[in-house]
């Protein structure tokens, strides 16, 4: 009940106290309401934030080491970024929620356990192989033995960064390992970087000496090319780099010498149509230029060879009647006759001409070869005395032969001709005396050497024959022409110019390689490489004794499209007692052979004729007369009866030009 005895002041005091209590209750309720609203707001934020959140409590062993984590709370972002249901994992140990997590390289237990215990916050990125995600993490102590972790899935970004990194590594590798020299210039045209190939071309150890080089000062860039580049257009620049000029201009220090041939491609680098720098690619084409020059030289020699072979063939057909009719005339004259000596000189001149044609044929690779396996060392040794007599006493001759055998497939006479010509060439280069050295060696030519010096030849084992002298030497211009027929540096009348061209042809016909090195005043070295063979060396072919009686009575069918040659052969054979049937073409020869009764004993035929070749003619006649024998005659070899200049087995062959004696003896030998 109200106290009726309260004074006004006391009543007023109680009223104020009641109002204060009521206000306190009202504020307390408002605070409770505000807290609920705030809690709901933060709960909504917690549940709906994109970042994952998880609250852990550390579990320790007896030694205080973290061994597990209990999941106290987690948000929807946790589900999204881990794939785990919060309703299924809250309250569980982490090792239960994620079996195998203790072995994950991310080490969640150790990392978050230590943060919970030490209070040291961390911000880092980690890769969870178990979950297959890459996270950006912020972890901090949320209470005693508790760790709050906020994390964002950055897997896509990380993958993009890895792709970008791999792309950069790939392009860096291309840049570093490119066989093309690459140079990068800034907007002002100053060199800021080069790749290793640039250093290799320039002969530099590092790039420091050339960085800062001004591309606009380069002699490679003409005013037109400079303007094109500055206007944003790429330019192609064929150039050569002379290292002597580089040293004289003191551009950079290099141990290289000589001249490099380069192909350069300069490209403006642009960003939003504005030039930001320049890229220069530079390819060393020196080797290609040298190969092109060698190829052109080979083509030229091939063309000259074909021309020379054709001329020699025709010239042989002219020489045969000259030699033959002169021999006939000499047989009818007495040695005392005043015409005898004149005809003798004609014969000698004809024989010299025949020798020239043989040399031309050797150059054009149309010589007939008798190939066998032989050891090069005895060939050199046996020939040494004759070579010493040839060069005279004022020139020393030394030989250095491979201790092991040097077996090659070759025509011994042609190899001796090569030795003879090279030694004579060396002798003529040493007017005041000197030294000639002959060497043999068993060598292996690798791809690098073959590519540089031998073009299309295959790498492998070869036998080397080298002839060196201490003579006057040759400059590069002379070396370009030394294997051409009739080229000579000797005085008029002192050389035919066929010595080295003959060597070249013989080596080529033996599937060999010839290489020369010389400098003016420093002598010359000729190296010949012939394919090595494994078969045992064969003894020299036993010469069949020439028949002493060269007369005969057999019937011979002569087929030759050159009138003068045919007439001489027919007259000669008739004079030696043979019955001769004359045919001016292969067609006539086939008809006459078919009609002839009794059949001819021997077919004497030219190899190359317009209608059909000699071999086909023989095959057709042999179908009618199986017992007929055949003797082929020709001015140069042809694939009709030979392969690469080597006579097919069982083939009887008479090389034009021939003498009457050679003709009659060969006919008698074939008839038996």
Image: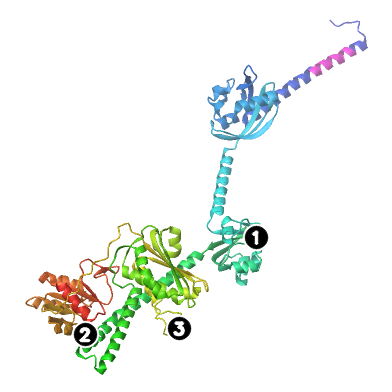
Mark 2 or 1, nearer chain start? 1
Q: Label 3's element? A: loop
The quadrant where residue 439 appears: bottom left
Mark 3 or 1, nearer chain start? 1
Sort mark 1 into few (<14), some (14-19) or many (20+) by Cα contacts within 10 Å: some
- 189 or 303: which is nearer to us? 303
Q: What is the spatial separation of the Cα atoms under label 3 and label 1, in whole angstroms?
A: 52 Å
Mark 2 or 3, nearer chain start? 3
Residue 311: percent from left, percent from top: 32, 80
Mark 2 or mark 1: which is in front? 2
Sort mark 3 into few (<14), some (14-19) or many (20+) by Cα contacts within 10 Å: few
Residue 563's disc number: 2
Check disc 3 and report the residue beneath it. 491
Left or right of 383? Residue 337 is left
Left or right of 132? Residue 405 is left
Residue 210's disc number: 1
Magenta residue span? 12-24
Mark 3 or mark 1: which is in front? 3
Q: Is residue 490 magenta?
A: no
Left or right of 461? Residue 40 is right
Compared with 126, 664 (above or below) is: below
């Amino acid at each position: 009940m109200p106290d009726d005895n309260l004074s006004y002041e006391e009543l007023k005091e109680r009223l104020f106290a009641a109002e204060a209590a009521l206000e306190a209750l009202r504020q307390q309720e408002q605070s409770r309401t505000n807290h609920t609203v705030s809690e709901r707001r933060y709960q909504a934020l917690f549940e709906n934030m994109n970042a994952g959140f998880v609250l852990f409590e550390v579990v320790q062993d007896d030694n205080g080491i973290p061994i597990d984590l209990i999941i106290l709370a987690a948000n929807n972002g946790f589900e999204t970024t881990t794939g785990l249901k919060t309703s299924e994992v809250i309250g569980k140990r982490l090792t239960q929620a994620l079996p195998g997590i203790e072995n994950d390289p991310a080490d969640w237990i150790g990392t978050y356990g230590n943060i919970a215990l030490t209070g040291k916050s961390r911000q880092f990125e980690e890769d969870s192989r178990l979950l297959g995600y890459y996270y950006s993490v912020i972890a901090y102590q949320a209470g005693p033995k508790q760790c709050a972790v906020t994390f964002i899935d950055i897997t896509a970004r990380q993958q993009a960064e890895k792709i970008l990194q791999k792309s950069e590594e790939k392009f860096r590798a291309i840049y570093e390992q490119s066989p093309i020299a690459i140079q990068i210039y800034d907007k002002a045209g100053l060199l800021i970087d080069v790749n290793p190939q640039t250093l290799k071309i320039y002969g530099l150890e590092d790039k420091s000496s050339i960085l800062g080089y001004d591309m606009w000062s380069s002699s490679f860039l003409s005013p037109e090319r400079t303007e094109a580049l500055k206007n944003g257009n790429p330019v192609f620049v064929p150039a050569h780099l002379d290292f002597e000029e580089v040293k004289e201009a003191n551009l950079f220090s290099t141990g290289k010498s000589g001249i490099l041939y380069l192909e350069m491609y300069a490209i403006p680098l642009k960003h939003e149509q504005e030039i930001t720098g320049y890229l220069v690619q530079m390819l060393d084409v020196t080797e290609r230029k040298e190969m092109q020059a060698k190829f052109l030289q080979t083509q030229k020699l091939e063309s000259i060879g074909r021309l020379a072979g054709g001329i020699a063939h025709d010239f042989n057909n002219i020489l045969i009647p000259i030699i033959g009719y002169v021999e006939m005339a000499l047989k009818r004259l007495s040695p005392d006759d005043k015409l005898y000596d004149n005809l003798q000189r004609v014969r000698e001149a004809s024989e010299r001409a025949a020798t020239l044609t043989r040399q031309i044929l050797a150059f054009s690779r149309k010589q007939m070869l008798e190939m066998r396996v032989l050891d090069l060392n005895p060939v050199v040794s046996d020939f040494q005395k004759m070579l010493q007599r040839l060069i005279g006493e004022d020139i020393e001759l030394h030989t250095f032969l491979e201790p092991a055998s040097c077996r090659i497939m070759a025509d011994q006479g042609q190899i001796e001709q090569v030795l003879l010509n090279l030694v004579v060439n060396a002798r003529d280069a040493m007017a005041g005396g000197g030294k000639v050295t002959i060497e043999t060696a068993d060598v292996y030519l690798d791809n690098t050497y073959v590519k540089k010096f031998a073009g299309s030849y295959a790498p492998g084992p070869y036998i080397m024959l080298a002839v060196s002298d201490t003579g006057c030497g040759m400059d590069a211009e002379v070396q370009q022409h030394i294997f051409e027929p009739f080229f000579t540096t000797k005085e008029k009348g002192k050389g035919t110019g066929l010595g080295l061209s003959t060597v070249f042809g013989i080596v080529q016909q033996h599937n060999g390689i010839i290489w020369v090195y010389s400098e003016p005043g420093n002598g010359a070295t000729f190296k010949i490489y012939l394919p090595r063979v494994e078969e045992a060396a064969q003894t020299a072919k036993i010469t069949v004794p020439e028949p002493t009686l060269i007369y005969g009575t057999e019937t011979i069918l002569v087929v030759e499209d050159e009138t003068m040659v045919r007439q001489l052969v027919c007259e000669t054979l008739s004079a030696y007692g043979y019955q001769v049937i004359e045919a001016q073409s292969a067609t006539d020869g086939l008809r006459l052979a078919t009609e002839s009764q009794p059949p001819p004993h021997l077919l004497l035929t030219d190899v190359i004729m317009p209608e059909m070749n000699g071999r086909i003619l023989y095959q057709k006649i042999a179908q009618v007369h199986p017992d007929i024998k055949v003797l082929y005659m020709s001015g140069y070899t042809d694939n009709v009866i030979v392969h690469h200049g080597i006579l097919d087995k069982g083939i009887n062959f008479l090389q034009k030009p021939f003498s009457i004696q050679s003709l009659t003896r060969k006919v008698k030998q074939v008839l038996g």
